[in-house]
Image: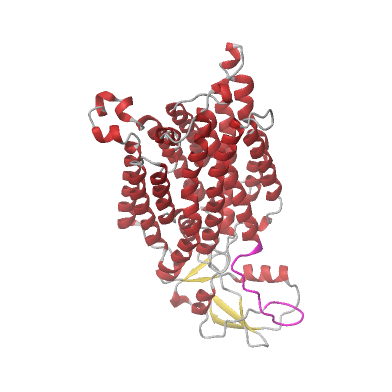
């Protein structure tokens, strides 16, 4: 909600700064939106690293406090620089998204992963419903509701403080609940050691290097076996994850699991004997999934920025001439669509299709959907026929609904695939890298979208360089994202059903 509540009024806030005319406001709005993502880009990897060492809980709580303070500051913005500084502070202290995904990966298994990540998206949907409504209807309350707030000098001087105060209060409630009830999930801090099942290791080894092993099997406990290789290395046949999605574990956890042995090398089944496995922080699967996630985030943030600018732009310049209330109403309806998708449709589809297939279906429609928006403003909203103009709202909502359905399929699936691609217990690191990559493109996207929109309105060039230009670029980027999805390995969409969670006494 802390992000979506700003969408309906940030355009009007910049307008009230008095630093630009209508055609150039988008340029400055983009910088405000980018400041949050730039700060998050600089710190997301750090917070993922911190959460792998001190735990998920303290990082999540700190993010909620940072969110509360920064929102109160943003609501009192009277200049562009203050608005940028307050959003940057929120980004610096907000490492919640990647850490929250890591937490989900640690508390779910094959039976509930799809449902859990759907609920994660569900919370975003609730924010999408409530945020725009509150932002649109509570902005400038002294003017909109003079009977209630007209006598408050503070709200007259700070017309956008009330929605920010409400959002900050919700963040503070989240902090209070988390402080008293949120438990730590990092396996090392909970006193558990991660182990991987014998069958999973055997399947991976045989797929990678078929042949005869030169290792002798040693049994250390009923649930834990090792093979001593001719080189003296240990083949960790039972090193698994606490959850099925954290596929391998960190070198630090490996030492605690078999600290009685030399664990510097891993035995592989090859005809030449045991060889040392290359230890990489990120697997190739993780890199490809994170690339897809970054493209998806880039596509989404540019559109979100462009949508608000396009919808409030006057019809004579290719927009719809919406008010902040219109934007809030429209986005809230789309939040309801997302809510149904997350709560009902995606969990149902997840029973029959792997996440990769759902992701590929979602991104395949972007190329067409984004061209529908300028089509509506050009041929429907600007039509001389009143009957055709009446179709503006239905067609706009239909096109937005399709886009939000695609978003649910794509974003929910890619969150699952990021977790499935993690190795060596570096779930926090993988999610930190993915969040850093997404934050990087999100810090570029709003500024780029605002600049392109302002340029398209001021260049006085014909199609395709007029207001169609940004949407054409989005359509091309959507096609690129769809093509890239075909190079993501299918293994990241497969569930791992054999999981053991062993306490130290069971080794």
153 horizontally vs 340: left or right: left
Residue drawn at the location 55% of the way across and 77% of the way down: 224
Residue drawn at the location 65% of the way across and 34% of the way down: 469
In the figure, residue 406 lies in which quadrant? Answer: top right
Residue drawn at the location 33% of the way across and 25% of the way down: 144
Q: Is residue 82 magenta?
A: no
Whether 426 is drawn above or below 298: the answer is below
Camera-nearest residue between 495 and 184: 184
Image quadrant in which the N terminus is located: top left
76 horizontally vs 452: left or right: left
Percent position (x, y) of residue 274?
A: 69, 82
Residue drawn at the location 34% of the way across and 46% of the way down: 73
In the figure, residue 5 lies in which quadrant? Answer: top left
**Main secondary-structure element of the magenta-colored stretch:** loop
Question: Which residue appears farthest toward the left when viewing the image?
Answer: 151
Count of marks, rendered view: 0
Whether 111 is drawn above or below 300: the answer is below
Note whether residue 348 is visible: no
Percent position (x, y) of residue 347?
A: 54, 44
439 horizontally vs 81: left or right: right
Percent position (x, y) of residue 352?
A: 62, 46
Percent position (x, y) of residue 351?
A: 59, 47
Q: Which residues are magenta?
A: 268-284
Note whether residue 294 is visible: yes
86 horizontally vs 37: left or right: left
Whether 386 is drawn above or below 271: the answer is above
Camera-nearest residue between 336 and 48: 48
Whether 256 is drawn above or below 457: the answer is below
Q: Is residue 274 magenta?
A: yes
């Amino acid at each position: 909600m802390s992000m979506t509540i700003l969408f309906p009024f940030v355009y009007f806030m910049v307008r009230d700064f008095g630093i630009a005319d209508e055609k150039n406001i988008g340029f400055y709005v983009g910088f405000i939106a980018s400041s949050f993502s730039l700060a998050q880009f600089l710190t997301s990897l750090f917070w993922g690293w911190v959460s792998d060492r001190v735990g998920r809980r303290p990082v999540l709580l700190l993010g909620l406090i940072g969110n509360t303070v920064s929102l109160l500051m943003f609501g009192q913005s009277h200049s562009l620089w203050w608005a940028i500084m307050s959003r940057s502070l929120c980004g610096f202290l907000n490492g919640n998204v990647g850490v929250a995904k890591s937490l989900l990966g640690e508390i779910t298994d094959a039976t509930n992963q799809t449902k859990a990540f759907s609920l994660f998206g569900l919370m975003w949907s609730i924010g999408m419903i409530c945020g725009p409504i509150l932002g649109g209807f509570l902005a400038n309350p002294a003017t909109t509701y003079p009977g209630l707030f007209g006598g408050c000098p503070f709200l007259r001087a700070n017309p956008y403080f009330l929605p920010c105060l409400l959002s900050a209060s919700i963040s503070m409630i989240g902090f209070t609940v988390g402080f008293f009830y949120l438990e730590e999930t990092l396996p090392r801090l909970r006193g558990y050691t991660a182990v991987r099942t014998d069958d999973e290791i055997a399947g991976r080894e045989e797929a990678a290097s078929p042949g005869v092993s030169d290792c002798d099997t040693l049994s250390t406990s009923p649930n834990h076996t090792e093979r001593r290789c001719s080189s003296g290395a240990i083949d960790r046949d039972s090193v698994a994850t606490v959850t099925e999605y954290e596929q391998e574990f960190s070198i630090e956890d490996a030492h605690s699991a078999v600290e009685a042995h030399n664990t510097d090398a891993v035995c592989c089944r090859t005809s030449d004997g045991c060889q040392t496995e290359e230890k990489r922080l990120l697997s190739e699967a993780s890199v490809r999934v994170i690339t897809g996630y970054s493209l998806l985030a880039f596509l989404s943030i540019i559109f979100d920025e462009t949508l608000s600018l396009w919808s409030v732009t006057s019809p004579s310049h290719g927009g719809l001439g919406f008010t902040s209330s219109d934007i809030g109403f429209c986005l809230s309806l789309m939040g309801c669509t997302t809510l149904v998708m997350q709560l009902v449709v995606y969990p149902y589809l997840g029973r029959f299709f792997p996440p990769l297939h759902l992701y590929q279906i979602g991104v395949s429609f972007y190329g067409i959907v984004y061209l529908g928006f300028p089509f509506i403003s050009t041929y429907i909203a600007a039509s001389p026929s009143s009957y055709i103009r009446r179709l503006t709202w239905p067609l706009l909502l239909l096109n937005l609904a399709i886009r939000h359905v695609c978003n649910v399929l794509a974003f929910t699936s890619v969150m699952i695939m990021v977790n499935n691609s993690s190795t060596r217990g570096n779930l926090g690191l993988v999610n930190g890298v993915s969040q850093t990559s997404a934050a990087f493109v999100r810090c570029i996207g709003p500024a780029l979208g605002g600049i392109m929109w302002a340029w398209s309105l001021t260049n006085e060039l014909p199609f395709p360089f007029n207001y169609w230009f940004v949407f054409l670029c989005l359509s091309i980027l959507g096609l690129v994202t769809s093509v890239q999805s075909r190079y993501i390995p299918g293994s990241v969409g497969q569930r791992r059903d054999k999981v053991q969670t062993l306490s130290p006494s069971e080794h």
